[in-house]
Image: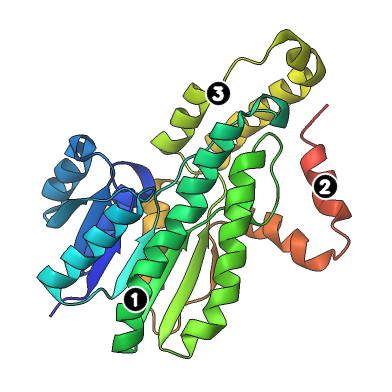
Amino acid sequence: MASIALVTGTSTGIGLSSSVLLAEAGFTVIATMRDLAKSAALRTRAEETGVKVDVWQLDVQSEESVQACVQAVLADYGRIDVVVNNAGAGFLGTLEQTPFAELQRIIDINFYGVWRVVQAVLPVMRASGSGRIITISSIGGLLGQPFNDAYCAAKFAVEGMMESLAPVVKRMGIQLSLIEPGPVNTEFVATVLKSAQEPPESVREAYGAMLEAYMKGTQQAFATMGQTGDDIGRIVVEAATTAAPHFRYATSELAQSVVSRKYVDPSGDSVVAMSGARLP
């Protein structure tokens, strides 16, 4: 019987690619998303690839939705072998112009959402003595990125949660992996940019030159070094299938070179200098 993989946030991008590539690799895939009206792209890609994915509704911001989905999957399939936590949201802007409600939303989706899903699936994985939990993090979960204060705070929290949990659940036969991309050209970035708010005049005067330089450098990085959703999806499949998955997967040479700085400089000074070099 095929292994059962539950993937969150699958309407676009990394989640969509991961779902299709896992199905190609022989998994029975339950691809979940908050709004099933946005499932057309996933269904089309699956059909074109010649694979089947089971599309379900799941809102990671709702405890009731998470629990209902997990219990329904267990009722239909009897087990969950792999979970891919991909659902996420970003926010770009200065701390001064980040409404507290927006901070709460970003933390809720990116961190509490992961917590809810992991908490729901751990009992069944523990009972079976096996399972893999793969979480899409970011180099922004290891190194702060200018004007991504809320997003990086959430991803740092995810990294700490998983690093704490990994050695405990490993003794129960459960493997945890973090996938840490740098630039990835998916709809995620376009959505973040579209939601960015025009700062008030006082904020623009103080931060405008830095924001402009950061955005220019970011756009160049995505244009020249950005990976695709499929690039990341293939790493998800590797983490789901290899005999001994790594805990961390920095997904490109760029990501590896950036995050390695964190491990060789205990002071953190070079990390701040590296980020600051992108600003005037």
Neighbour class for label 2 at 10 Å: few (<14), some, many (≥20)?
Answer: some
Label 3 or label 1, whichever comes before in sequence order: 3
CA distance separating discs 3 and 2: 24 Å
Residue 267 falls left or right of residue 186: right
Q: Name the amino acid type tagged 2.
A: Val
Question: Gap in Å between the C-alphas at discs 3 and 1?
Answer: 38 Å
Which amino acid type corresponds to the residue marked 1 in the rendered image? Answer: Thr
Counting labels gives 3
Using the image, determine if residue 117 lies above or below residue 155: below
Lower position in the chain sequence, tag 3 or tag 2: 3
Q: Amino acid at mark 3?
A: Ala
Residue 175 spot, x, y in % from top left: 44, 79
Q: Which residue is mark 2?
A: 272
Q: CA distance from mark 1 to mark 2?
A: 36 Å
Q: Residue furthest top?
A: 201
Judging by the rendered image, the residue that carries numbered circle 3 is: 196
Of 217 and 190, nearer the camera is 190
Which of the numbered marks, if any, corresponds to residue 35? Answer: none
- Helix, strand, or loop for circle 3? loop
Q: Is residue 247 above or below residue 103?
A: below
